[in-house]
Image (spheres, rainbow, N blue to C red):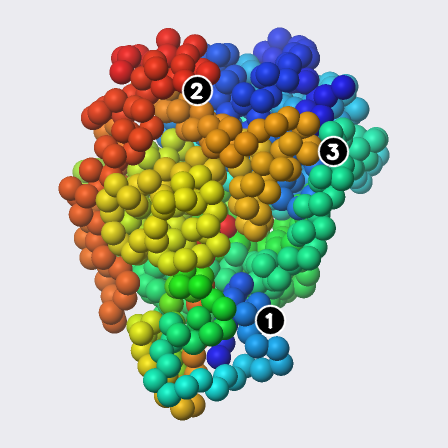
Amino acid sequence: MRLHGELGRFAPRGSSEADVPEGTSIAQLAGLLGIRSGEYWLAGINGSMVEHSRVLRPGDEVELIPPVSGG
Amino acid sequence: MTHGYNGRILKVDLTARRLAVEHRDEAFFRQYVGGRALSLYYLLNEMEAGCDPLGPGNLLVFAPGVLTGAPVSGPGRNGVAAKSPLTGALASAEGGGFFGAELKHAGFDAIVVSGRASSPVYLWIRDGEAELRDAEHLWGMAVGECEDALQAELGDRAVRTAIIGPAGENLVRYAAVVNDRSHFAGRSGVGAVMGSKLLKAIAVRSSRGNNRMAIADPAGVRQLVTWMREHLDLVAGLHDTGTAYGVKSLNAGGGLPSFNFRAGRFEHAEPLNGETMRDTILIRRDTCAACTVRCKRVVEATEPYRISPEYGGPEYESIAALGSCVGVGDPLVVAKTNELCAAYGLDSISTGATIAFAMECFERGLLTEADTGGLALKWGDGPLTVDLVEAIAYRRGFGDRLAEGSARLAESIGEAARPYAMHVKGQELPMHEPRIKHAHGVGFSLSPTGADHVHNLHDTLVRGESRHLDLVRSFDPTLQPMETTVLNEDKMRLYYHIVHYWHFLDCAVVCLFLPYSPQQLVDLVNAVTGWDVDLDEIRRVGERSITLARVFNMREGLTAADDTLPARMFEPLLQDEPVTAVPLQREHFKAAKQAYYRMMGWSEPGGVPTRATLESLGVGWAADQLPVPA
């Protein structure tokens, strides 16, 4: 998992990996990590942007990208 | 004894070379708070209506807020306001650094500058005393050089400054005022107004030092300081990569303005993102008064450009405007053009966006080398953009036309160029793509200062349950998350509440990146001032600010017909893969504006504040300033 920007605070201590039940979607993974639906904007798997409902497969590299407001 | 404010406004009449102190009471500060609303009070009451923004009739107001100078992260900022030479509407920009806090500590809540000096001057403020001094020897200097000279002349390296560079002196319509060398009141041409008055700089020093502002309840302030210290993880990403993180996020979502807003993705975005900057040219992080976040970038490089760390480093807006928007993917070019914008005192957003517009006109044959003095304005030409920034600041060659901003440049080229000028009311769009966040586009059109991304709703922040949605719900618990490209009355209600709050922050004057809840800010206002404000009172400060800005703009000749958005926003983005972008629909756009006028208690369809609305906000006096009553 790569949790970008302010989402880094939700990363499990000492690990960038997570074991989840079969059939878990990205949205469900985010929920398991304590990330609410609006805290992340985009989700990527293996470098491509995907729907939040996309079901995870073994070995997938997941990215969660927060929205930004500029500066 | 007053808390949170001094009760003293410094009035500077440059024509008569006369200084005076105006005393204001608690009721005044509770009503206007500072920053934008306080500035509007003076602009409406003391600026010559219909004046030339670059003439002596304009007023220039430097205004911290009641929170500025408090020893806590966030309120180390001040506003600068005037009638804008870029838009003819309100100019209102906020800058960070230490200048605003030092001004408060030195005994003033605002500086109201009128008239025009007969020769260059600077204003020197120390411990409640002020004097105008000759600045002939400073005129022409870049910002850093001028600050060095001022600090040497005044014999104190701790003097804080607000300075214009050559761009302000040369009346570039989007010149900035630079606080403490690397913090910018960037937008809407406040630097040009300062230049038109031959006011090169303001230098300020308080021998009382920091943390000496009279606070009603110091323990209450310390409570927020402690909370922030315990919640630094909420801003760890901001500290790490700064706002430059936005490059990665927005590019992934097809919302990184590229090639003059024709595209939302940029193939060379990776080298421009905040992580790359952190791992290459970032040498340290800087901060504003009392702020523990330390989000400001400080970069340095020697090849192929020498980039001095004295001017900090690029934020997201600068990276996109001087990078993807002009097709430049070289981070060193962006860091160099950003540094030059700082040294010369230019708004990096309008600078990049105006160059991008010219590049598109060149590509379309609307501009040729005969117009540009032999320059081929090609997308992605880094050395060219570096040269153009300097040409703009000094109004050299084609730079003289770019210095007028994209709206005036479009007028001078002709009707065919108009659709490609990305501006609202004459102010260039900041680096946010309305086609991925529709209410944000409506916000561009409604902003009293022309297109603005700060006092605006970012639809992407409220598309699900989030801290940001919690923030808006402080004002209306019934608000629900909404998709980014939905535009209806419910979406505009989210916009309505958040924008009131952002305007309050621009009055107080507080950075919007701090993760405080509105209730925490209410508590902070009360701890600093000893007042008993509540959420509704601070919301109404924002509402008052927006409404007074509307009155000001209407007095200066603007109408609802100026609440526009470039035609491009109603057309599809060029994309090479499916993204989240959808063009706005004109009927939804129009209905959203009308819904907002209604929520604000403004007339329909003209969007004019009614006398009843103004009276309910305690500013009934402003109704007499409207050219056509609602």
**Residue B628 drawn at (x, y percent):** 27, 13
Between tags 3 and 2, which lies in front?
3
Mark 1: secondary structure = helix
Disc 2 with disc 1 on a shared chain: yes
Could you give the CA–CA distance between mark 3 and mark 1, rounded to whole angstroms?
43 Å
Q: Are marks 2 and 1 in contact (CB under 8 Å)?
A: no
**Residue behind mark 1:** B279
**Residue behind mark 3:** B217
The chain holding disc 1 is B
Could you give the CA–CA distance between mark 2 and mark 1, rounded to whole angstroms?
50 Å
Give me the residue at 43% from left, 76% from top.
Answer: A29
* Res B591 visible: yes
Image quarter where the N terminus of chain B lies is top right
- Relative to B323, does residue B456 appear above or below in the rendering? above
Give me the residue at 25% from left, 71% from top.
Answer: B577
**Residue B199 drawn at (x, y percent):** 61, 25
**Residue B404 drawn at (x, y percent):** 38, 35
Q: Are marks 3 and 2 in contact (CB under 8 Å)?
A: no
The chain holding disc 2 is B
- For label 1, the crowd category at 10 Å Cα-Cα, with few meaning under 14, some 14 to 19 and many 20 or more, is few
User: Which comes before the other along the chain, label 3 or label 1?
Assistant: 3
User: Which comes before the other along the chain, label 3 or label 2?
Assistant: 3
Q: Amino acid at mark 3?
A: Asp
**Residue behind mark 2:** B617
**Residue B56 drawn at (x, y percent):** 50, 15
Q: Which image quarter: residue B145?
A: top right
